[in-house]
């Protein structure tokens, strides 16, 4: 399963359901976009290190950007940005999940619901 950035925010806020969700998964992935968002959200170097250590401790694998992911994200923006307000970061995360044939877990399912070829698991905090 690939996790959207918001799942980590729920964990940081102490949400036990989000923590259990991550713990139950055998294989844990994030997109390069999620990794960037997590680092960007850190207030200082200590939080950077905490984030990197958390991802390492729980065996998360970061899926790098590729030409196919970039192309698919572009198609998603063309199809869904005007009609549904899809943003570039979410398009990259969705494209990473679709290109990797993984289920995307997010509590922001409204951002991803219109994307027909995406397997989505909605998380309800």
Image (tube, rainbow, N blue to C red):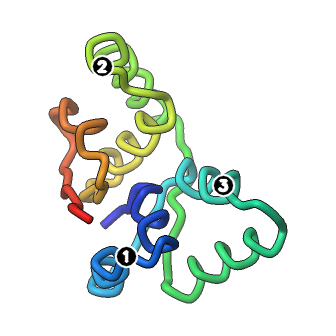
Distance between the Cα atoms at labels 2 and 3? 26 Å
Q: Residue at x 33, y 74 (%)?
A: 18
In front: label 2 or label 1: 1
> Which quarter of the picture shows residue 44?
bottom right
Provide residue 62's location: percent of width, then percent of height. 54, 64
Q: Residue at x 27, y 38 (%)?
A: 112
Which of the image's four quarters has the N terminus?
bottom left
Q: Choose between 97 and 41: the one closer to the eye.
A: 41
Provide residue 16's location: percent of width, then percent of height. 33, 82
Q: Choose between 71 and 119: the one closer to the eye.
A: 119
Above or below, comparing residue 11 to residue 72 in the picture: below
- Residue placed under numbered mark 2 in the picture: 80
Above or below, comparing residue 65 to residue 38 in the picture: above
- Residue placed under numbered mark 3 in the picture: 41
Distance between the Cα atoms at labels 1 and 3? 18 Å
Q: Along the horizontal axis of the image, is 24 left or right of 31?
A: left
- Residue placed under numbered mark 1 in the picture: 15
- Whichever of labels 2 and 1 marks the residue nearer the N terminus, that label is 1
In front: label 1 or label 3: 1
In front: label 2 or label 3: 3
> Which quarter of the picture shows residue 83?
top left
């Amino acid at each position: 399963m690939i996790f959207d950035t918001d799942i980590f925010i729920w964990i940081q806020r102490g949400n036990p359901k989000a923590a259990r969700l991550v713990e139950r998964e055998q294989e844990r992935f994030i997109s390069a976009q999620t990794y960037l968002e997590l680092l960007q959200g850190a207030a200082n170097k200590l939080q950077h290190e905490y984030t990197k250590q958390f991802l390492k401790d729980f065996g998360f694998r970061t899926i790098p950007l590729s030409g196919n992911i970039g192309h698919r994200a572009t198609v998603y923006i063309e199809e869904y940005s005007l009609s549904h307000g899809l943003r570039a970061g979410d398009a990259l995360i969705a494209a990473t999940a679709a290109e990797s044939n993984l289920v995307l877990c997010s509590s922001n399912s409204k951002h991803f619901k219109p994307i027909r070829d995406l397997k989505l698991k909605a998380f309800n905090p």
